Amino acid sequence: MNPYDSGASTVAPVNCSSRALLGIVALFPLAFIAFGLAVDSPRDIYHGLIRILSSRDTLITDYIGLGGMGAAFVNAGLLTLMAIGIYHVSGAAIGGAAVACLFLVLGFGLFGKSLLNVWFIVAGVYAFARYKKEPFSRHINVAFFGAALAPIFTEILFSSALPLHFSLPLAVGTTLLLGFVLVPTAAHLFTAHRGYSLYNIGWVAGILGTLTVAVYKSYGFVPDPVFIWTTGNNRLLGAMLAGLFVLMVAGGYLLDRQAWHKLAWIQRQAGQSPSDFVALAGMGPSLMNMGLTGAIGTAYVLAVGGDLNGPTIGAILTIVGFSAFGKHMRNIVPIMIGVFLASMFKDWNAHDPSAVLAALFGTTLAPIAGRFGWRWGIAAGFVHSSVAQSVGHLHGGLVLYNNGFAAGLVAAILVPVIIALRAPAHNEDLPP
């Protein structure tokens, strides 16, 4: 038996209402806003936000470099608070998936998701829900995860040679349509990786983004590459992240004095999607797990000589968010090791931006390590490091979850191979 799968199938969670869970999550965007106001003046933040809202967001656009540190953190905090408000108004049940989604909004609010560009993707999902006569709360996670496609809006709006009265409706119409088709596409494409890549919408968005770029390229519209990557802020941003993660661990213990015991149970789970740790173990141990995995992600960046900035903090917060929905310390580390080992044998360094992001975002493949063991986790990370650096040109950088797209490909191919190579007795607990 895989040691990750041993132990009881559930533990007794300390339940929190959806309103209370949203209140806990809201503390973190509020902390981002407070940090932004502490490091920059309101005037600088205002002008920085204008630059962020009026610029393209193609990968990689570090909002710290584009609009300044204060504006980047205020943008992320305000955007996440608005998302939390929509979750509350919609009456959505809050669990691990919603927590993961909101932390992705917070993280990507530092590089790619702005107060301007996400809303027509969300509106497209809302339109689909109305068309199907289903509550929006049923699809709200897809709506905000689907904001991975938000750069398409600003790319069409700001980089097109068309006048505004043409580019604006074209941008709105394109992103509304993408939002509308997200839900059925996501449901269908999930079967390709069977939950072994946690970023299902990244996989879906990569395919939709590739299709969109192919259509626009056929009309002569080619996205221009962007690379804004800030350096030199490791001390300040490392201290800020350390404070957040200490708050998470301490808060988890205060919410549930049995959190350490339940955290040990979380570490034994495979993490294959859906694995809602909030529902199964409670917010206390989930929050503690989030703080610890965030610390691991931050330590990795610093250990390899990488930079803490908008993109890497976004990647770290993605690990943090999905530590309520599938990731934990034991299943993410093998993926990181695989990417690091790849840097020793391939034509890049572990501290290169693309390699650092592959190691952090590549933990979407954590269920492979959790289900099949650490050796296969290392292999998955090793393969992912190459795929992640090769697929970006397909969508022209207009899909924020590039590593999610790459990981979907890796999981779709690697998992069937693993299952085929394992002894039949080891495959009895796997779906057909």
Image: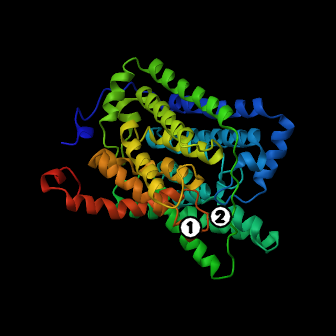
| Left or right for 213, reference 195 | right
**Depth order, front residue of 321/91:** 321
**Residue ID at (40%, 36%):** 329
In the rendered image, is residue 183 in sight?
no
Which quadrant: the N terminus? top left
The answer to which image quadrant residue 76 occupies is top right
Pointers 2 and 1 in contact (CB under 8 A)? yes
**Residue ID at (68%, 66%):** 225
In the rendered image, is residue 423 in sight?
yes
Which quadrant: the C terminus? bottom left
Mark 2 / mark 1, whichever is N-terminal: 2
**Residue 314 in picture, x, y percent from top left:** 59, 45
The answer to which image quadrant residue 258 occupies is top left
Query: From the viewer's perspective, is residue 315 above or below residue 61?
Result: above
Query: From the viewer's perspective, is residue 355 above or below residue 96?
Result: below
**Residue ID at (48%, 24%):** 249
* Element type where label 2 sits in the image: helix
**Depth order, front residue of 19/344:** 344
Residue located beneath label 2 in the image: 152
Number of other residues with Cα within 10 Å of mark 1, as a class: few under 14, some 14 to 19, many 20 or more: many
Residue located beneath label 1 in the image: 209
**Residue 213 in picture, x, y percent from top left:** 60, 73
Q: Amino acid at mark 1?
A: Gly
Query: From the viewer's perspective, is residue 168 above or below residue 85?
Result: below
Query: From the viewer's perspective, is residue 201 above or below residue 155?
Result: above
The number of numbered discs placed on residues in the rendered structure image is 2
Number of other residues with Cα within 10 Å of mark 2, as a class: few under 14, some 14 to 19, many 20 or more: many
**Residue 263 in picture, x, y percent from top left:** 36, 28
**Depth order, front residue of 229/204:** 229
